[in-house]
Image (tube, rainbow, N blue to C red):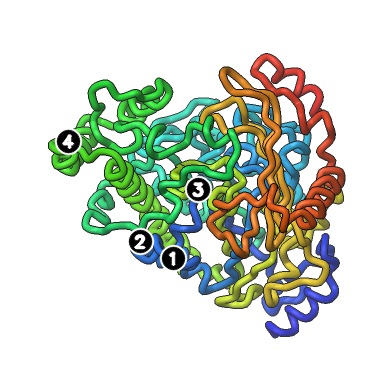
Amino acid sequence: MKNNLFSTSMVVLPIISAVQPIWAQKVSNKPLNIVCIFTDDHAFQTISAYGHPISKLAPTPNIDRLAGNGMLFTQSFVENSISAPSRATLLTGLYSHQHGQTRLGCCLNPQKQWFTELLQKKGYVTSVFGKWHLNVEPKGFDHYDILFDQGEYYNPKFRRPDTNGEYIKEKGYATTLITDHAIEWLEKNISDEKPFCVLVNHKAPHRNWMPDFPNMHLFEDVDFPEPETLFDDYTTRGPQMKTQELTIDRHMGYAFDFKVRELKNEPTLQYIRDSWLMAMAEMDSEQRATWEAIYDKKNEEFLKNPPVGKDLLRWKYQRYVKEYCRTIRSVDEQVGRLLDYLEEKGVLDNTVIVYTSDQGFLLGEHGLYDKRFMYEESFRTPLIISCPSLVKKHSVCKELVQNIDLAPTFLSLAGVEVPKEMSGRSLLPLFKNGKAENWRNELYYHFYDYPAVGSVRKHDGIRTKRYKLIHWHGEGSGNDEAIDFWELYDLKKDVMEVNNVYDNPKYVKVREALTVQLEKLRKDVGVTEKTFYIKIHENEKTKLYNDSL
Ligand code: CA
């Protein structure tokens, strides 16, 4: 029957839309439930199914279990590597310039259609839990239980439809609480009457990587492998790498990021200091005392004899990656808990589970932390799709897919026709063996959030299976000058992206072809002169918002 299902659904369904309900061809005749686990800033390097050396020392057996039950996408990317735009893309199936949320703070057009609204019309009961962080109210959800702002790791505040707009503080750890609420809702909503769609949006592993108490001691004796580019000197790269403020060495805070009580004369940026005080203020006195006792002990040796120079960067890298992996441990445990729950309820075989993140994350590559850049570790994002009745187990897809494809995928899984306005494509045709006829050969990327935290300049670009062309553009702010700089990487010969060959005579033909392709892509996706070079400053938010309606 499984083969019949594949052959029928793959051949008959158009690539863009799946008009016929898939479940009509299934033994049970039941519609598929949908669970989307959406983490914040999850680096594929820390999911062991992807096989990166870091993940071998900090495995994720439960996320791997999902991969074992489905398809691992190794070439999954975002269209704009930053949180709010990516959240809006997940909901709308649109590029940032189409839904309006080009930057962290602005400006999602609330009139755009969300896939959840269409699922409701199809008879789904829908909900979202955890991180929201959009200026627009949830719509197309029968229930929501969302975090205040970025959400805190300890004792975060949640808002539900019945709290009258108030955020209520809850005692506990964010990753666990979000899963608690999702399971509580499922307990009331798993039924034979209606299929469900639930979005589980974790705060983890977002900065500042505060682990849950039971996981604080993990990896103490582990030395994580350093990326080859930890000491990258940015030779061949442009001025944007000299002015960005996302290096582990110079831009992380001792207290906020490394959990060392503030050092004398520490040049911490004010927002980092404020964020740390806010995070600690949410703890109760007992939690705080436990935290301080644990970290005082951890930090003894460092404070007695702090390393210097390259050794200091090495120490920072280890501390950063360990804290990051500790928060991932909670994510993995809670993914396992949710899977166990669905299995116990007997719905696992009929539920599509998507595991993905709003973008990837740099774990010391190029000496950096954070996202934003079109460099692989930030641009790429994990994607695993599991559904025993639909997706081949232990399968791998190496095609270029992007977060614009998720909304169309959810719709086609539900048998809803994908609206023509959506820019992405349903991934269903890839489910059989990871390949599909006429699949895309290139991706478009555009980062707009400048001037802003991190000082990463605006850039757009094209990525094919082999090459990446990036154009850094736009006027400068503060001491930054206007920029018009190009980078070209041959990803086959230069996996680390340290050798910009844009001016290399051997690559003239490649460069010219890619430039034409990029121009065409811009035109195809509708990045006009206005949205491309638009100046987005605080006082222009309203204007831009109105323009985008
Ligand atoms: Ca994020």
Q: Is residue 344 above or below residue 92?
A: below
Give SS at disc 2. Answer: loop
Observer-nearest of 529 and 74: 529
Residue 48's mark? 1
Gap between marks 2 and 1 measured at Cα: 8 Å
Gap between marks 1 and 4 measured at Cα: 33 Å
User: Along the polypeptide, which appears first: circle 2 or circle 3?
Assistant: 2
Label 1 is placed on what type of residue? Ser
**Ligand 1 has an atom within 8 Å of the beta carbon of the residue at disc 3:** yes
Look at discs 4 and 2 and give the one toward the viewer.
4
Q: How many marks?
A: 4
Residue 58's mark? 2
> Do tag 4 and tag 2 residues touch (Cβ < 8 Å)?
no
Tell me which residue sits at (61%, 20%) in the image. Answer: 477
Residue 303's mark? 4
Label 2 is placed on what type of residue? Ala
Gap between marks 4 and 3 measured at Cα: 28 Å
